[in-house]
Amino acid sequence: MELYRLTAHELARMIRGKEVSARDAIESLLKRKENVDSKIDAYREEGVGSKSVLVDADNVDAAIRRGEDPGPLAGVPIARKANLCVKGKLTTCGSTILFPFRPPYDGTAIERLKEAGAILYGCTQMDEFAMGSSTENCGPCTKNPWDQSRVPGGSSGGSAAAVAADEAIAALGTDTGGSVRQPAAFCGVVGLKPTYGRVSRYGLIAFASSLDQIGPLTKDVEDAALLLSVIGGHDPRDSTSLDIDLPDFREGLDEPITGLRIGVPKEYFVEGLDGEVKGAVRKAIDELVALGAEVVDISLPHTEYAVATYYIIAPAEASSNLARYDGVQYGQRRDSGALLGMYEETRQDYFGDEVKRRIILGTYVLSSGYYDAYYLKAQKVRTLIKNDFDEAFKVCDVIVTPTSPTPAFKIGEKMEDPLQMYLSDIFTISANLAGIPAISIPCGFSGAGLPIGFQIMGRPLDERTVLQAAYAYEKSTTWNERRPDLKWITKSS
Ligand code: GLN
């Protein structure tokens, strides 16, 4: 089998056992990228840095030859979304305003991947500043490997497409309102958003700081558990990082789920939900029941306010976070001769339309006179949404829902209608508002051959149960073994 097809845990085991070298793995991945990425555009022009990854691979191989422990991700190439800082590497968050920013440091998740022996492999495409659900707010937009006329989801669409097309063994993405889970669902891979505070945000370029979390996109649930065990844990450099023990999430992953209480919220199976998605998720619930779980009907009554609440809080925080891009310290500058003119022209010319829309929205809801009516109210509703989950978790252990109301939509379909785009986040946003962990895993295909994902949400910090349920389901089905054939690109791929 081609090495690029393997999962992280399989490849790391083979490299550690000297069955294959880290160099073989990187060469296989580089070849794969050369064959397919010109059509998928999962990677940004910043590219992979083929020379430096070969040197990194040789270092891993040399360490293994010297008998040193190369770490749990020895030699595994892992892609990163373009909003995660890697020392010395171009990191633009998908925005021209940040070009040509090269961070002087590694973010914590990146540092931990490197310490675990992983090879930081390439920078993936994303919606500018992670604002979007389709990886179209950037150029060139990433194509869904299952159908090139469709989006891969967003904003971590490059990471999801890279994993789905076997152009990366695994990838990191970020999830503020669904940006790991929704692209995972659209591309037929696994995407995990950890509990808020589980993974340090140090070195993640901020979008909405009370919602942002870094999470893995992987080919199977075991890899999601492995990556979370590597990147998670306390970090004094992020004041919201939780100072609690980080378990090895692979331990006990295969425990039976007998007696697990699955909450099914009625508010997530409503009008607007695609029939094929509904059918696939219902079947997934039946499968979990066949594995010993029990269904509990629950209600999350404030779900209908989640989209509105998120699209007030996230832009408010973004407008504040993005105030720093004024041409002075980072990236590009339009030098008009006058200081105010420089700020204005730099922001006018180098931010994209969606980012400007969010800044305007965010500034408006925070402005005096409107603060109470919008921002403060949204914060109160956020508490109600969180309370819904607290109540629900008194009677169930996990909550199962669709990840997205539809399979991948067409490129361009929602670009002229931001509200329709925002509504595609309807099932993922609440987990961010409540800060709870949630995973998306494949559960079927539409008649048109597009992947469908379902979501499992858990109690705060209970990634273990979420992963166990996902693992049990994955092992009893074969959805995650399917890969797009990519015949539309090249016969030899
Ligand atoms: N699609 C949502 C937005 O546009 C979520 C983005 C994200 O999670 N980064 O804000």
Image: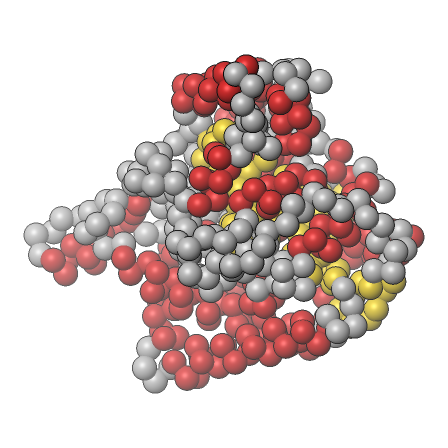
Place of residue 216 in the rendered image (x, y in percent of width and height, measured from the top left): 58, 44
The residue at the point 67 percent across, 59 percent down is 462
- Please state if 323 lies on the left or on the right of 464 as rendered: left
The picture places residue 165, in percent across and down from the top left corner, at 62, 31
In-image side of 77 versus 207 (left or right): right
Image check: 207 left or right of 275?
left
Quadrant in the picture for the N terminus: top right
273, above or below 87, in the image: below
For the residue pair 105 and 408, the one nearer the viewer reads as 105
Residue 11 seen in render: no
Residue 33 in the image: x percent, y percent?
Answer: 53, 24
Q: Quadrant of residue 36?
A: top right
Between 114 and 392, the residue placed more toward the observer is 114
User: Residue at 54% across / 23% down in the picture?
Assistant: 68
> Residue at point 21% right, 50% down?
329
Q: Nearer the viewer, residue 118 or 82?
A: 118
Q: Nearer the viewer, residue 198 or 347?
A: 198
Residue 310 visible within the image: yes
